[in-house]
Amino acid sequence: MASSATATDMAATATSPARNALWRALTGRRGLGKLLLLAMIAAVLVPFAASRWGSGAWPGALTVDLSGPLGQASNWIIDNRDTHPLFLYFFGWISEGVIVAVRAVYLLLLALGWTGVTAAASLLAWRVAGLRVALTALASFAVCGVLGMWVPTMQTLALMAAAVAASVVVGALLGLAAGLSERTYRALRPVLDTMQVLPAFAYLLPVVLIFGIGVPAAVLATVVYAAPPMARLTALGLRDADHGVLEAVTSLGATARQRLLTARLPLARRELLLGFNQTIMMALSMAVIASVIGAGGLGDRVYQALSTVDVGSALAAGIPIVLLAVVMDRTTAAAGTRIGEEPSGPRWSYGWQAWAGVAAVTAAAVAAGRAASSLTWPGSWMVTIAAPVNSAVGWMTSHLYSGVPVIGGTADWAGHFTTWILDPLRSGLTALPWWAVLLIVAALAWLIGTWRTALTAAVSMAVIGVLGVWSISMDTLSQVLAAVAVTLALGFAVAVAAARSRRVEALIRPVLDVLQTMPQFVYLIPVVALFGAGRAPAVAAAVAYALPAVIRITAQGLRQVDPAALEAARSLGASGAQQLRQVQLPLARPALLLAVNQGVVLVLAVVIIGGMVGGGALGYNVVYGLAQGDLATGLVAGAAIVCLGLMLDRVTQPSSDQAGKER
Amino acid sequence: MARVTRRTRMTRTRVLCALAAAVGLLTVTGCGAADMTKQTSPFANAQGAKSVTLSVQSWVGSEANAAVAQYLLEHELGYHVDTVQVDEVPAWDALSQDRVDAILEDWGHPQQEQLYVQNKKTIVSAGGEGVTGHIGWYVPKYFADQHPDVLDWRNLNKYASVLRTPESGSKGQLLDGSPSYVTNDKALVKNLHLDYQPVFAGSEAAQITQIKQFAKEKKPFLTYWYEPQWLFNVVPMVEVKLPPYTAQCAAKPAAEIDCAYPTTPLQKYLNADFEKKGGKAAQFLKNFRWTKDEQNQVSQMIAQDGMSADAAAKKWVEEHPDVWRAWIPK
């Protein structure tokens, strides 16, 4: 639909229902045309390909075995890491720089002591975002201490500070380049778009290959993951600057640099802050995943708890991460909305006096902490929540796991889900001829986008085949499809309820907030306890992770439907169900498509880390590659994940190309 | 026009200045080499505290070692201890790069030993841990009692249909643990022509959860497992005999192995620099040596009784001063 939607079409559809029908028929025919063209291409190519290479799984003749060269590269790096100039004079210094930076922040945080850090964070939040956020910050840091996680929290904070600073610098520079030069923008945009949809897990391996396990690798992987939103939003902010203002500034004789510094950058402040906010959130969500490659801190505690299915300890380490995320999110978001507002309140509460006050109170807090010689959180103020949580979870699993009358236990559900849904889906996908898969992918992508998206999607699938991981990629794909189906069914149902009733919405909103900031790993632990090991728990974790975003986007889309249209339908005597089916859902179609796209991307990310709970397939290969130091296996699987992510995004994303042209 | 030339000249001067500054900075910082393999963790030795970083592997025995060592280092020798969870092979890499100081339980990695201990000399052996490990395939005792012939690998195919699960499809399930463990199971299944599918639980904890659930319902299962392990006290299991281990078989490439796993005396390893400069901590870790039963006591407190690793270590240390006194360097 959107593929052929020019601005005038949109206007026409909005105004006249008669034209609407006509337009729809036209696009329907256009879709048909695309399919016919594709069928013609297929009719020529498929018999040739099928007779030459057969039509089962991807033909062996078309694969390239990379394990030899990749293994050699990995061995070469290990052998030469301490002698080759490339490592001594380039990577070595990067690594050294990261270590120095993280260490400096860590020592500063330790020197401030718990009193100083808590005071500084709360006061900063108060200055930037107001009293409420300040109180949240105060409470959050106190909770980190009470849970006995003070030192790991400081380690994670130090790591985050270094990673976020680097991401912001890299992202802003890229964004600046893309914002000022049309050519750079066109070159960078597809890259950034793609990076946004890739599972974080795929970033770990190349970094480990060069830097080895440890903090430098963790920080760099985080930077690669967290810099793209900053770059995107910087570029967006610079390009969207008000042309009238720019014209005025130019006519006043400003040079290009003056124009940038005095007009374009200040005008883009809001986008810059939003980018900063996004970067922080992405970096925090990476904190746990990066612990697989030695990030330490809170993430490592969660990771250790995962390997012992210790839900209580995982929760104790997971809560501080969620709290850090909430505080940073609220602070930066409030800073963004406050831009341009006049300061209010008594004179001492803004301007330099306020900052001086912040510094003075922080110094006093540090001094108090030092005087009481209490730098890390006092041990007597700690509460261990692990034991009670674990006994609660133990009770739940022992009563729900099996033998529940009538509905059966969770283990039975998992078994049925595996035998009745996952297995047939997997054997169906594996049994499809390889050229049929390519055709289906191309058709889906073309229907929803342009020939370019179709080509990208089909080529991505072909690369998976060439890499020689066709069948396990089909396994991963079957899990993704099953999880997406469940997510959408549940998500749409809840969203419809939330969109119709204020009370339901108020009830689920805080739940969604918390679920969305939870690190992906935390979902893996309870699902093992409930569903055993295998593909079913991986799917369950993926559903739990993707559900909040799907519910939120769908509910928002449904609620934003023009009230006049609803009113009209009601006055014509449409029932509730009719209103939903014939008015709300069609009008909210863009939001629904977005929800599908987001759902697919999020599900893929978790299905991959499901390799750690028996999900097998590509995720297992990445985990195996990391665990056994067999980077060839891991890198090939990582590349396949990238291709799968690209393909899934392209077949669900309604013509990103069009959106680009409109800009 | 004049203004433009002045501007360009100014820019040029500025660029030159920047270049000079960059060159200066490089010379000051030494323009030297930065050896990545000699960079410690940024969290080590903070604020002058003597600190030791131990690598913990994901199985409970390794956790027990680390917990007791950590408790004694902190309370008897006054060190600060960081533990980092790293899988076995990357742990060797991290140990050689000084990201961690010690591995306390290694199940035998001849390739890494050759590379880092023999060739690069960045890692040194710290002697045996006192425990002997053995990996094998196990079935629960209640199942073996009913069907004694399952204990020979040649009869395994007969039971494949009994051992089927949703996850293994049409074949029998061979339950495997974490991908990081030393395992030849895929090769064994193929080379011994067994009608089984190795299913990786993803982590030892997931595997234990699964075994306990099977045992609760007295269902039969076949699993990759190892000794010493506290779980034997909870779920009694019997080993299935595989073709005997030989040196020739072990020398084959990984994909062609068709014999049982060896019996391995578990080893400790230290970073070479840490061994020289680590003082009492290094000496303590070298002295650390206990028995299978002692390790199991701590493991069971952690895994079965739900105690935190630290609490379990405390309890064990208080009850067995005679064992650990000998480890503390004078």
Image (cartoon, rainbow, N blue to C red):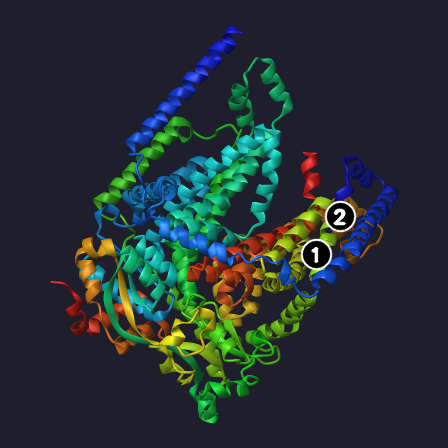
> In what element is the residue under mark 2?
helix
Tag 1–tag 2 contact (CB < 8 Å): no
Q: Subunit of mark 1?
A: A
Horizontal arrangement in the rendering, residue A417 relative to residue B190 (left or right): right
Q: Position of residue B324 (x, y in %)?
A: 18, 70
Furthest residue in direction left, as rendered = B330
Q: Residue at x 88, y 43 (%)?
A: A18
Q: List the residue tagged with mark 2.
A: A587
* Residue kind at label 2, given as amino acid type: Leu
Q: Which of the pair B42/A64 is nearer the observer?
A: A64
Q: Position of residue B94 (x, y in %)?
A: 34, 55
Q: Subunit of mark 2?
A: A
The image quadrant that residue A319 belongs to is bottom left
Alpha-carbon distance for marks 1 and 2? 32 Å
* Residue kind at label 1, given as amino acid type: Leu
Q: List the residue tagged with mark 1.
A: A438
Q: Position of residue A461 (x, y in %)?
A: 65, 55
Horizontal arrangement in the rendering, residue A129 relative to residue A81 (left or right): right
